Image: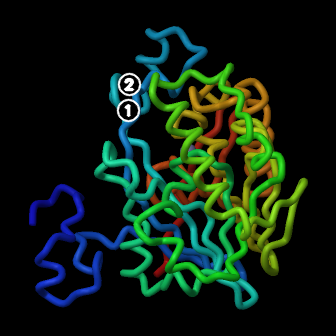
Amino acid sequence: MSLDNISHTGSHTKAAGLTPGADELVPSRYALRVGEIDVLVVSDGVMPIAAQVLGTNVDPAVLKAGLNDMFLPPEVVDWPLNVVVVRSGGRTILVDAGLGVEFPDFPRAGRLALRLEAAGIDLASVTDVVLTHLHMDHVGGLLGDGVKDRLRPDLRVHVAAAEAEFWESPDFSRVSMPRPIPGVLRRAAKQFLNEYHSQLRTFETEYEVAPGVVVRRTGGHTPGHSVVRLASGSDRLTFAGDLVFEVGFDHPDWHNGFEHDPEETARVRVRLLRELAANRELLVATHLSFPSVCHVAVDGDVFRCVPAVWDY
Ligand SMILES: [Zn+2]
């Protein structure tokens, strides 16, 4: 096995009688506790995206220099995909579902199902799914590959009412995505809404899914984009979904090409980062480098992600 961080779950896995994913070089899961709440960050893998989407309102030379400062390549960056499993009050909650295996152009993503299994988490034990929004890199893991059949029939899928409504007739006039992507996003969201229609539990502004686990609509990235806020005892953690990208600490005003309302997203991003810096709670976000668990420091208009200590 080469030391390249690529999963090796081929036929030798079955031959050895191992759990799929159990013989990966790294398990790609990271556990922590927030008071009484168990949290597991799981990597769905990484997907390459054109670096230009990280700063669509920035002069290309400035973007290139900024990416270089952050040790990010100028043309194509690997976008991490973090998913979170939360256990509280007897409920097992999957927050977002990664890209899934429906999109063969991204062979290094779609690992979630394997990695949950390797972590001993049966899909049938998941009582709730919370979706920050309905972009394919967040709902794809629920589509295809027999996943729906392995989930329990009484599964509750929580999504903001504004998000479900948006995808009935989505507005792509403000985004800046490579050509084929809007169509793929439309189809994935529609497929999700069709397949999970009867399990959807929509909320207006916020909903407490389990003790100390609150999903709250922020808007911005998409009209129904939501974050998940965990609170137990004096501990706090926020899963920020797509409000914060790798470049969002140094350049919170940079627009991301996937943002359906980029100005509003930047306002929401700065407000959240300032709040997390002030109350010193932990941050996890979808597209920050795994496991992404960090505190937020602030200096004027610039933020910093300070990695948390892992104590397992
Ligand atoms: Zn995303």
Where residue 32 appears, as percent x and y from the top left, is 56, 76
Mark 1 Cβ inside 8 Å of ligand 1: no
Position of residue 25 relative to residue 241, above or below, is below
SS of the residue at dot 2?
Answer: helix
Are the residues at dot 1 and dot 2 in contact (C-beta closer than 8 Å)?
yes
Q: How many marks?
A: 2
Viewer-proximal residue, 225 or 144? 144
The N terminus, quarter of image: bottom left
Position of residue 94 relative to residue 261, above or below, is below
Query: Residue drawn 22% across and 78% down?
Result: 23
Position of residue 165 relative to residue 130, above or below, is above
Q: Amino acid at mark 2?
A: Asn
Residue that mark 1 sits on: 72
Mark 2 Cβ inside 8 Å of ligand 1: no
Query: Residue drawn 82% across and 46% down?
Result: 162
Q: Is residue 135 left or right of residue 312?
A: right
Q: Amino acid at mark 1?
A: Leu
User: Which quadrant contains ligand 1?
Assistant: top right
Viewer-proximal residue, 301 or 13? 13
* Label 1 crowd bin: few (<14), some (14–19), many (20+), radius 10 Å: some
Query: Residue drawn 68% across and 20% down?
Result: 173
Where residue 9 appears, as percent x and y from the top left, is 21, 71
Give the quarter of the image for residue 293. bottom right
Query: Residue drawn 72% across and 81% down?
Result: 35
Residue that mark 2 sits on: 68
Residues under labels 1 and 2: Cα distance?
Answer: 6 Å
Where residue 34 appears, as percent x and y from the top left, is 68, 76
